Image (cartoon, helix red, strand yellow):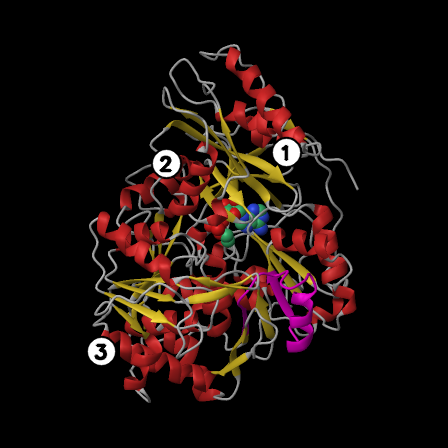
Amino acid sequence: MTDNPEAEVSESQIAVHWREEDYYQPPPQLAAQANAADPAIFDRFGEDKFPECFAEYADLLTWDERWHTTLDTSNPPFWKWYVGGMLNASYNCVDRHAQASPDKPAIIWVPELESDEQVTISYGELHRQVNEFTALLRDFAGLQAGDRVTLHMPMVAELPVTMLACARLGVVHSEVFGGFSGNACGTRIADSGSRVLITMDGYYRAGELVDHKVKADEALEEAARQGQEVDKVLVWRRHPGKFASSTPMAPGRDFYVDELLGGFAGAVVEPVSMPAEAPLFLMYTSGTTGRPKGAQHSTGGYLAYVAGTSKYYQDIHPDDMYWCMADIGWITGHSYIVYGPLALGTTTVIYEGVPNYPDGGRPWRIAQQLGVNIFHTSPTAIRMLRKVGPTEPSKHDYHFKTMTTVGEPIEPEVWRWYYSEVGKGEAAITDTWWQTETGGFLGSTLPALQPMKPGSCGPGALGIYPVIYDEDANEVPAGSGKAGNICIRNPWPGIMQTIWGQPERFVDVYYAKYNRNADSKDWHDWPYFAGDGAVQAADGYFRILGRVDDVINVAGHRLGTKELESAALTVPEIAEAAAVPVIDDIRGRIVEMYVSLKPGVSADGMAEKVTKAIEVEIGKIARPKNVWIVADMPKTRSGKIMRRVIASVSNFADVGDVTTLANPEVVETIRRHVQSAKAAKGETPRDLTDAERAEIATYGAAE
Ligand code: WTA
């Protein structure tokens, strides 16, 4: 290994040291069958071939009408792909495979309880289920192309059936992660203007049957408070015929899907031919400000991009057994459980539960039993499985050819366990860097063609041209050892079209920072700002450092600082609130809250109230590790809370220079209180790496 020169985080000029990792070469047996085995692919996607190179991805789909313009840049940065093209996403993911091989498994659903039967849905059966539910959506719910529908569903096969039924009509689905609270769902119903909510009564999580219907009632109440009425709630039942929830059904508003479906038995609904530019779905995500952003994805560009990247980066063939252990409620599940794999006609495994239920061997039992040969998961799941069962994989007879990781930076040491234990040294790892907004992979290695480097995602994906800029828009050269803001210089088919209902915010958040000329119609003037810090090594590989926009990445879930703080402020006794990240060895980052109380309020029970408020407003995934009640927050003279100071306290890091604060004296009081309480609970952290130290020391800079 060679030592890399120092890197710096541009805002703070804090040195970040790390070592360059050794390469791992692609497994030789992969090349013999890989979809991308010939290096000529790099020429086909060379910058001189842009944007026409992306016809190769669109050609994986069946079009009702071929496009006439691959990329239309007439209204920057609202790029249009495959203009003039007409297609249907449901047809592409279902009908064409049902015609060619009706008996082939499309979905294998694995319930969490091992005593429950697995369900195999062939392409023919998927076609039947999607058609019947489409008829229900059209004839019972009165939905048509362009309407938005909110889904709040767990990891069941009925979720892709619902998504594909919406897509069949051109109805825009907006799936909210099942773990989000009723209120969070309600906010998204209101923002998208949905009049129909599709949910499920309950589901299994960590061995318990969770009541999920209760969230639908909360969601409708919150949506109504925000001015959006919902007239129908369609409730799938986890066990058809048997209600899994104790929350009553509202007559005339709530309907059991399994009862209604009887009236649509055998129905066939022609897929509605949609323009490539028609929105396919919304996926809400967090950013610097409080209100969630509905990333709007297109039908043609998105589907082409996820099909192409599934084919080349995950090396999916129709006869593979593919398992992505993410949740369909996030973009990873949309792109790489549902749309990408089904567009390619492969078999996609859907697992209902948590990876370590009932024990850390569960994923490997599933892999062995089903013959999974492509596996996709997150660093948090890898860290957790390593902790609970470091030698479990070797006890199971399965063989992966490729494995993907996504959602957070992966530590080289964790990468190596994934490679040698989970992959048994036989599988290529693709570390895929991308975002909700980007539809599909942006940075990764082609598994049979490019060597892997632990902790680095790799170079830009085919047809993607990343660049690192400093704060003044100077390019930070590869190999300089300096960190900066990673951007993508060019448009690509998977990029979101806009933020639903907030086009100005779309331009402001992603393009304004590095736009060279607001009047320019040349895409070269509109780099996409991803909101991540990164460093590029001399070999062109990127190492992603994390968010630069006050988003805390907890177990791969993006939580906005502002969302957490507004949730805390719903407690009437709270005067001020600040959320900070704490380094965690399993979940990457966890949240700690600092709050101050209104005058005369007693601290009794306040921490619990804040935690409860966060669960209600966002969901249990956002629950803070600790809530610290302080007399006063450290502030600048202009009154801004210094989040970096309290983040340093929570992480036992150096608080830096506090002499310019309006109230420097509070820092030491807070430090003593928090750190002695944490030490007493055994929460003293390990030594932080320099990159982690830099992240903490600059936390809150985006505000
Ligand atoms: C982070 C998930 C390092 C990054 C697909 C990004 C990663 C955010 C990686 C997007 C990776 C994603 N290495 N960091 N391979 N993949 N991230 O929208 O900070 O839920 O901006 O999309 O996750 O999270 P999102």
The image position of residue 665, as x and y in percent, is: 52, 11
Q: Which of the image's four quarters has the N terminus?
A: top right
Badge 3, how many Cα within 10 Å: few under 14, some, many 20+? Answer: few
Q: Is residue 142 left or right of residue 167?
A: left
Distance of mark 2 from mark 3, alpha carbons? 40 Å
Circles 2, 3 touching at the beta carbon (< 8 Å): no
Badge 2, how many Cα within 10 Å: few under 14, some, many 20+? Answer: some
Secondary structure, mark 3, is helix
Is the residue at mark 1 in contact range of ligand 1, meaning its CB lies under 8 Å from it?
A: no
Which label belongs to residue 139?
Answer: 3
Q: Is residue 510 visible?
A: yes
* Residue named by callout 2: 566
Going by the numbered disc 1, the residue's amino acid type is Ala
Dot 2 or dot 1, earlier in sequence: 2
Q: Nearer the viewer, residue 32 or 590?
A: 590
Q: Nearer the viewer, residue 182 or 466?
A: 182
Residue occupying the point 64% across, 77% down:
370
3 or 1: mark nearer the eye: 3
Residue span colored magenta:
348-376
* Residue named by callout 1: 691
Dot 2 or dot 3, earlier in sequence: 3
Badge 1, how many Cα within 10 Å: few under 14, some, many 20+? Answer: some
Distance of mark 3 from mark 1, alpha carbons? 56 Å
Dot 3 or dot 1, earlier in sequence: 3
The image position of residue 440, as x and y in percent, is: 48, 58
Residue occupying the point 37% across, 47% down:
523
2 or 3: mark nearer the eye: 2
Q: Is residue 495 left or right of residue 420?
A: left
The image position of residue 549, as x and y in percent, is: 45, 36
- 125, above or below 377, in the image: below
Secondary structure, mark 2, is helix
Going by the numbered disc 3, the residue's amino acid type is Asp
